[in-house]
Amino acid sequence: MDDWLIAIIKVVCIWVWVLLIAVVMTWVERRGAGLIQDRPGPNRAGPWGLFQPLADGIKLFTKEEIIPTKARKILYILGPLLFSLPAFSAYAVVPFGDKIILGGKEIILQVSDVNIGFLFILAIGSMGVYGVILGGWGSTNKYSILGGLRSTAQMVSYEVPLGLALLAIVFVYGTFSLRDISLAQQGTFLGFLPNWGIFKQPLGFILFIVAAYAEANRVPFDLPEAESEIVSGYHTEYGSMRLGLYLFGEYVNLVTISGVIVALYFGSWHMPYIDLGAYLGPISWGIVSFCIFFLKVSFFLWMFVWVRWTLPRFRYDQVMGLGWRGLIPLALFNIFITALFIQLTV
Amino acid sequence: MAKPVIKKEYTLTERIYLWEILKGMKLTWGHFWFNFKACWRPGPHTIPTCWQYPEDRTREISPIFRGEHMLQKDDKGREKCIACGMCAKICPAKCITIKKGKRKEGEEDKYAAKTYPASFEIDLLRCIFCGFCQEVCPKEAIVLGQNFELARYTKEECILDKRKLLLNYRKAKEEGKLRPPRKRVPVVPAPPKPEKAEGAEAKESKAAAVGKAKKKPVAKKKAAEKSESVEKVEGGEKKEAVEKEE
Amino acid sequence: MNQNPTSQTSYESDNYVTINIGPSHPSMHGTLRIITMTDGETIVKAEPDIGYLHRGVEKLGESLTYHQFIPITDRLNYCSAIPNNVSYEMAVEKLMGVEVPEKAQLIRVIMMELARIADHQVCIGILGVDLGAFTPFFYLIIQREEIYEIFEWFNGARLTNTFGRIGGVDADLPDDFEERWEELKPNVRKANDETEKLLTHNRIWMDRTIGISAFSAEDALNRGFTGPCLRACGVKRDLRIDEPYCMYDKFKFEVPVGKNGDVFDRYIVRMIEMEESLKIIDQAYKLYKEMPSDAPLMARVPKVIKPPAGEVYSALESPNGELGFFVKSNGSANPYRIRIRPPCYMMFQALPELVKGEMVADLIACISSLNIIAGELDR
């Protein structure tokens, strides 16, 4: 009974928390864009414009829902749902802290420590593409179809380097569980570096982050919604909260991806060089580990914004070229090197 | 299709994407950090390049800005306009309508000249703010002020009548935003012979007629009535000419 | 004759998709419409359809006096109104045989080169936006704002300047021009540098621009290309040097020339031209300062302009290319006919050739780099 209760509380908490981050992210994105571009960004609603996402939410909710006459109705309605559902559920296996001991009960700060870990993320993440393609197809709009097709090709292509980069991580840590990988990153590596995944897998990290950007449809890989070319891509015909689900799902995806990056490559909740867990009590360590993890995640969330307002956009065939001719050979090379290294050291 | 593309050889740093991307990110970070610090400054105008417009009106507007029109009064508070109709004639958008009125006895403190505009209407929906009216005005009566907030709720409000134009003048005077007196644009001095400058041969026939009319003091009534045809005169001279007529 | 281009050429095919890009599309500059037939994303056929911003400017000129037409020319290329004004004024002056005082010519040069910088900044900024790089646009547009500030203090308007009059200019440079100019110059250079840093050597940008919509010099000449787009093709033609006007022969400046005539070359040519414009303004302002302060700014022209009957074509190097005005007079106060030769009209009609075999994304880049302004395209 207790376990159930704890699980439900964890699910609700993490769900609210991820939603909250995603909401704030829409604000951070626009303010960040403003500051990068020598302008303040939205600063009218509330202090520093913090209520802007709220205002946007109200706007999206209260708008009339329009289904285009020629749209394929079921697909059109299904699209945003299929996009946002996987996005919301993928965070289930990503940790958000070490563990906390409440009333003598050890609670790990993770919704579910599945032993197939990031296989689950890959599986769920790749379901998001259905939402995009169905939305694009269901809209019966040429721009939407182009956007949907671009997105499909891109997501399918970039899952390969993403998976291969993760494979190398499995070689290193010998497990799929994100919590086990996180735990393994404590201490130092080679005596002077923090024992983080990035130092063991530098190439793998670059491959992963590039592929992750492509998976999340972020600049420079935002072709599916390239505004200047195909209007808004797959969500051209969407309005009101259906559009909101698409936009929102994207930010939730960013949170998940940042969480995975931190858990796999940036030592999860571990501080470099210092093992804070040894000095703090069980409850305070739980909170501190959560904070450390969150800080690291925020940095990567900010990275998404930062990169977005720096780079131009790829072209469709160039994205494919980069994926198949650049990243996949590199990922295979990375796996080879990792395997060789492990073979020699073990 | 012959497309003579000479492929540029990419250097190594260009080839690997990341180096240049990191350089670009460094640059954007610089901007971000600068503006982030500026964000904490007091006042609505925090980021130097951006004015928070409705609250922050510190941006200096040029005193010769071509905004909303006004009808000026002279030092004694009399209306300068003589209803000559030059502005209405020059206006490319044809947005000015003037009705002329004759000054009656005892109205000398209201109107500066013998004629005054009985009604003076500017249709802001038509106006293109070219500033020709103020340039051609012999008395500097109509000028374009600094007000650029021209949004109105109804179409009727967009038509400036004389009352609104004078009100604009009063407001500008109270705020000290009157347009400085017009600077005369120096014109190439006339050749020693009083004949017209080069290129004017085509109009000699007309020049003779109007030129004479101007010189004769007898013709002043006539000239005032069809003051639209005071065109033969040169830029600076024309002003004096109209003054003489009064 | 059927006016609808869709029915002139068949766009119906089982293998291809017809996409109407425009007239309302985020990256159509103004209201352009391009009917494309695509194979996947590759453009098989593209046909521009113009006229969505047609305002009858030329016809309007026939019912206005010569002076009244000046504000209308502002509305042609609204990114840089001043060269339009000057080009028209030069045409009428040529018709009347009026010699513009030197000081007025220098002011015209200074203002026109400022407008050139502003125009190029917008063009490059928008090219960046269309290719997904938003930030350079803001860095450039902030400096353009400073240039508009100078315009505002010069004669009171920012965008539709109504600069100059037939026979000269309407105002002298403001007293604080030098101050503003000295402040502006390094800022423009800095913004250009930053844009170059963000774009020029970035491989994503290079991939997107190099070799895209390339055009050979011969084709470009046949198609009537002018301005930066022609120079990007490798033809060194610049009216400022080839047919000097406004004392341009007294200034020393380079004319940048590209090789491929692709988007990248157009971008680079514009970048270098901005730098050269800065140099020209420096030289012109030096000459300007040597003039006495009461030197004439207006030639002696009659108040009502009635050029002798005849016709004239006069052109200058606007930021976009050769901007020509054909004015025909029958001796009355209204022009008998005005014909405008906008630079981007000629370039837009080469679009089908430029984008054939490219992708939809390249079409956008191509249009941006040609700097097509619907206002002067449709007139």
Image (tube, coloured by chain):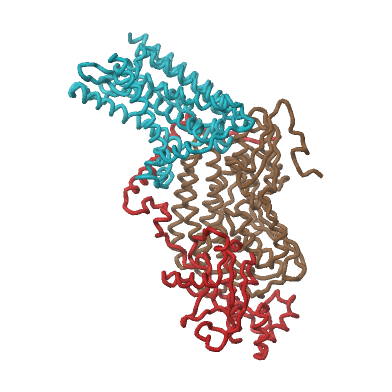
Chain colours: A cyan, B red, C brown
What is the quadrant of the C terminus of chain A in the image?
Answer: top left
Seen in the picture, residue B17 relative to B85 is either above or below; the reply is above
Residue at the spot 47% in from the left edge and 29% down from the top edge: B16
Residue lying furthest bottom: B218
The residue drawn where x is 69% and y is 68% is: C65
Side of C137 where A5 appears, left or right? left
Quadrant in the rendering for residue C161? bottom right
x then y, percent, for residue C320: 62, 51
In screen coordinates, is A321 left or right of A279?
Answer: right
**In the image, residue C267 lies at what x, y percent?**
56, 44
* Residue B87 vertical position relative to residue A244 in the rendered view, above or below: below
Residue extending farthest right = C1
Can residue A336 be seen in this snapshot? yes
Foreground of the two, B136 or C237: B136
Q: Position of residue B225 (x, y in %)?
A: 66, 82
C297, C32: nearer the viewer:
C32
User: Is residue B45 or residue C92 the one in the foreground?
Assistant: B45
Vertical arrangement, residue C75 with respect to residue A155, above or below = below
Q: How many marks?
A: 0
Quadrant containing the N terminus of chain A is top left
The percent position of residue C359, horizontal first and vertical second, equals 63, 32
> Left or right of C289: which side holds A100?
left
Could you tell me if residue C250 is visible in this image? Answer: no
